[in-house]
Amino acid sequence: MAPLPTPRPAHDAWMGLALGEARRALDTADVPIGAVVVGPDGQVIGTGRNEREAVGDPTAHAEVVAIRAAARALGSWRLDGCTLVVTLEPCTMCAGAIVLARVPRVVFGAWDEKAGAAGSVFDVLRERRLNHWVEVFPGVREDECGALLRDFFAAQR
């Protein structure tokens, strides 16, 4: 596997927005994962949080919700030049959506050692056999993102 790129200064600020979305998921008892899509100009064009419980949709992961909002804002399914920022390493479904939407960059916070598809369990985002590859910036505000999830699951037990 190639070395991972160094996070950029804007990634911390964008992760703060994703963390805000993750906290909003707590209002509907959803797992607190949040995402934002940042356009080529650095402006947020889509936001999302887990909404599986809220809307009864197994595909309503934060990344998918944010990608759908960004595609609506751009009027295109191709998210060329955009950056997806998410509090947890994307799962296989979300990684597939990222590849299909042609998102060129993903920034994530905590690693998902059970279901991650950006380098931990699988590496769908950098799979050379696919028709699109994604630059991955992991571990941005990792402690903060991980703590939010650990606190949520500790309260469930």
Image (spheres, rainbow, N blue to C red):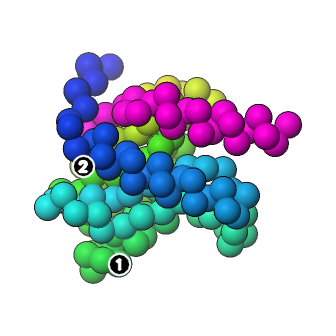
How many angstroms separate mark 1 from mark 2 (CA)?
Answer: 18 Å
Image coordinates for residue 118, horizontal then vertical, percent: 43, 35
Looking at the image, which is closer to me, 24 or 81? 24
Q: Amino acid at mark 1?
A: Arg
Count of residue discs: 2
Q: Quadrant of residue 136?
A: top left
Residue 58 relative to residue 136: left or right: right
Quick one: which residue is furthest to the right in this view? 157
Report the disc number at residue 72.
1
Looking at the image, which is closer to me, 68 or 2? 68
Q: Residues within 10 Å of mark 1 (few under 14, many from 20)?
A: few
Q: Does 24 lie within the magenta span?
A: no
Image coordinates for residue 77, horizontal then vertical, percent: 32, 71
Residue range highlighted in magenta: 128-157
Looking at the image, which is closer to me, 108 or 16? 16
On the question of residue 97 being in view, the answer is yes
Looking at the image, which is closer to me, 133 or 67? 67
* Secondary structure category for the residue under label 1: helix
* Secondary structure category for the residue under label 2: loop
Question: What residue do we see at 59% from left, 39% from top?
Answer: 148
Image coordinates for residue 152, horizontal then vertical, percent: 70, 42
Q: Residues within 10 Å of mark 2 (few under 14, many from 20)?
A: some
On the question of residue 123 being in view, the answer is no
Quick one: which residue is furthest to the left in this view? 41
Question: What residue do we see at 48% from left, 63% from top?
Answer: 48
Q: State which tag comes first along the sequence, 1 or 2.
A: 1
Question: What residue do we see at 20% from left, 37% from top?
Answer: 9
Question: Are dots 1 and 2 in contact, CB under 8 Å?
Answer: no
Q: Which residue is mark 2?
A: 104
Check the image and report above or below for 31 versus 69: above
Residue 152 relative to residue 63: left or right: right
